[in-house]
Amino acid sequence: MSHYVSIRFYSETYTAGMNVKCHMKLLVTAGNTQTPIDDVRCITNIFSGRTGGRIAVEAYRRGHAVTIATSVPKVLAELAPGIAFDPSRWQVRPYQTYDDLHALLIELVPGNRFDAIVQSAAVSDYTVAGCFVPDAAGRPTIDVAKGKVKGSHPELWLKLIPAAKLIDRIRSEWNFTGTLVKFKLEVGLATKDLFEVAEASRRHSLADLMVANTLEGMATVAYIGGEKLPCTAVTREELAGALLTQIEIVQMARDSACS
């Protein structure tokens, strides 16, 4: 992705990679996460989990064994009508909140049971540390988040604190040694700047591959890049297949180096 001048469309450049054949165990995360404010309210985001769902379904169609952790499991039936999934190589693990996903990753990632992890879930950047109303001096110090926040307060203050970056724990804390894919969404960046931000983010998380896009262009185009892969533009329809081919190529190279 550092070679941002090398922009080509997948259908023109990487069709030969579709002949790559290997069988892997993949973990795919998909969907959004909820950050609870009280027992009935939450902060979340707009993402539907369809991108991760398409990647998981495409991996299954290619013969891989897939575990998908998703906050929107109903989307999977929409993406794969008529497919009778074999439970020996298809497992759905639902979650709702950031804490749910964190617990799932702690359960699933350590031990290197997967060959590749695709972290496409839109994970909360912040967690709620309290919902406050002002005291007599006007300072937001009275926490009213327990149970259900009443609708009668003249004003409320939410305290948000940074949540731990789960993608960064996959290598450093959970010692995953397989192929790691990170997703990066930005708003309002020029293409060249998007590539530079995404490459820095990929390196920071020690990911092999990065999928980057902007909010403005996400419906039409995404970019796949990596340490040894010039940044490649793909349509949204091509993304799942193009990414799986690159994961297969990276994993086969890793397997060959270890043999």
Image: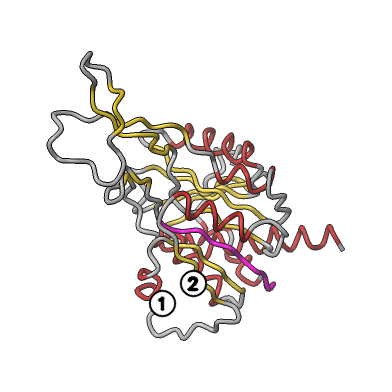
Magenta-highlighted residues: 22-31
Q: Amino acid at mark 1?
A: Ala
The one nearer the camera, 159 or 192, is 159
| Image x and y of residue 99, in percent | 48, 50
Q: Which residue of the protein is positioned furthest toward the top in this rendering?
A: 137
Q: Position of residue 101 (x, y in %)?
A: 50, 54
Q: Does the magenta-highlighted stretch encompass residue 23?
A: yes
**What's the distance in space between the residues labelled 1 and 2, CA to CA?**
7 Å
Q: Residues within 10 Å of mark 1 (few under 14, many from 20)?
A: some
The residue under label 1 is 80
Residue shown at 42% from the left, 57% from the top = 235
The local crowd at label 2, few if under 14, some if 14 to 19, many if 20 or more residues have their Cα within 10 Å, is: many
- Residue 219 position within the rendered picture, expressed as x and y whole percent measured from the top left: 34, 53
Task: Label 2: state its secondary structure.
Answer: helix
Query: Where's the N terminus, which quadrant?
Result: top right
Nearest the eye: 151 or 118 = 151
Are circles 1 and 2 on residues that touch, CB within 8 Å? yes
| Residue that protrudes farthest toward the right in the picture | 259
Q: Does residue 215 appear left or right of residue 122 in this picture? A: left
Check disc 2 and give the amino acid type: Val
Q: Residue at x 49, y 71 (%)?
A: 92
Residue linked to disc 2: 57
Q: Nearer the viewer, residue 223 or 12?
A: 223
Label the magenta part by its dominant secondary structure.
strand
Q: Residue at x 22, y 30 (%)?
A: 156
Q: Is residue 93 above or below residue 142?
A: below
